[in-house]
Image (cartoon, grey):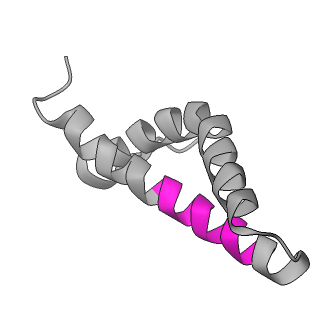
Amino acid sequence: MPEPGFYYGALFVSYAFNVAIMVAVSVILYLFSDASDWVYGVSLVLTSVLFIPLSFRYSRILFLYWFGGLKQRPS
């Protein structure tokens, strides 16, 4: 059973992932295209929705390793 607050903590890691993805997409659009404001908005929402499965999975994994005391076993 996960501890109370595990999903709440993983939510913050997921938020950080989404902010990083949105900043990266914004910088790429700014540097490589002459896009209008609605193109920025649609592309940010679309990439955020497309990366939900990855963000959901990896935010919980990273939260366990960083704050849960989980250690990786050597192979």
Q: In this rendering, would 1 be left or right of 30?
A: left
Q: In this rendering, would 16 be left or right of 46?
A: left
Task: Please identify the quadrant where the C terminus is shown.
Answer: top right
Could you say which is closer to the camera, residue 22 or residue 42? Answer: 42
Could you say which is closer to the camera, residue 20 or residue 37? Answer: 37
Residue 56 can be seen in this image:
yes
> Residue 51 appears at what percent x and percent y?
63, 40
Circle count: 0
Could you say which is closer to the camera, residue 66 or residue 36? Answer: 36
Magenta range: 17-28
Q: Is residue 9 magenta?
A: no
- Residue that appears at 61% across and 46% down: 45
> Residue 70 appears at what percent x and percent y?
32, 42
Q: Residue furthest top?
A: 1
Within the image, what quadrant is residue 32 found in? bottom right
- Residue that appears at 51% across and 54% down: 18
Task: Please identify the quadrant where the N terminus is shown.
Answer: top left
> Residue 66 appears at what percent x and percent y?
33, 54
> Residue 74 appears at what percent x and percent y?
53, 45
Q: Residue furthest bottom?
A: 31
Q: Residue furthest left?
A: 4
Residue 69 can be seen in this image:
no
Within the image, what quadrant is residue 31 found in? bottom right
- Residue that appears at 87% across and 77% down: 34
Q: In this rendering, would 28 be left or right of 72?
A: right
* Above or below, comparing residue 53 to residue 30 in the picture: above
Q: Is residue 25 magenta?
A: yes
Q: Main secondary structure of the magenta part?
A: helix
Within the image, what quadrant is residue 26 found in? bottom right
